[in-house]
Image: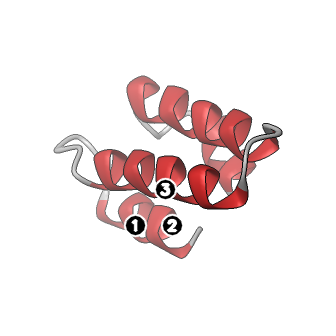
Amino acid sequence: MLNGLKEDNTVPKNVRMKVENSIKILNDDTEMEIKVSKVLSELEEMADDVNLQPYTRTQIWDA
């Protein structure tokens, strides 16, 4: 799901960059609790973006 958002050109660039960062966090070797916390924070920031289309916001929360 996140990879699809990263490749979607209709998603604002700053959101795509946060998606890419979230993917990197998930692939990191840190503890799962830390990864989940960081990614949830990133997802929340992405979903609050005013330039985001409503359907993209739904995709983010479904991720």
* Distance between mark 3 and mark 2 Cα atoms: 19 Å
The residue mark sitting in front, 1 or 3, is 3
The single residue placed furthest to the left in the displayed view is 50
| Camera-side residue of 10 and 48 | 48
Upstream in sequence: badge 1 or badge 3: 3
- Which mark is in front, 2 or 1? 2
Residue at the image position 83 percent from the left and 39 percent from the top: 29
Task: Tell me where residue 9 appears, x and y as whole percent.
Answer: 56, 33
Indicate which disc residue 37 carries: 3
* Separation (CA) of disc 1 from disc 3: 24 Å
Residue 8 horizontal/vertical position (percent):
61, 41
- At mark 2, the secondary structure is helix
- Against 7, residue 54 (above or below) is below
Image quadrant where one finds the N terminus: bottom right
Q: Residue at x 61, y 61 (%)?
A: 33
The residue at 30%/46% (across/down) is 45
Asked if one can make out residue 8 in the rendered structure from this viewpoint, the answer is no
Alpha-carbon neighbours of circle 3 within 10 Å: few (<14), some, or many (≥20)? few
Residue 23 visible at all: yes
Q: What residue type is disc 2 on?
A: Gln
Residue 59, numbered label: 2
Give the foreground label among 3 and 2.
3
Decide if residue 24 is on the left or right side of residue 29: left
Q: Amino acid at mark 3?
A: Ser
In the rendered image, residue 60, in percent from the top left (x then y), is placed at 48, 61
Q: Residues within 10 Å of mark 1 (few under 14, many from 20)?
A: few
Q: Nearer the viewer, residue 27 or 20?
A: 27
Would you name the residue on which mark 1 appears? 55
Q: Amino acid at mark 1?
A: Tyr
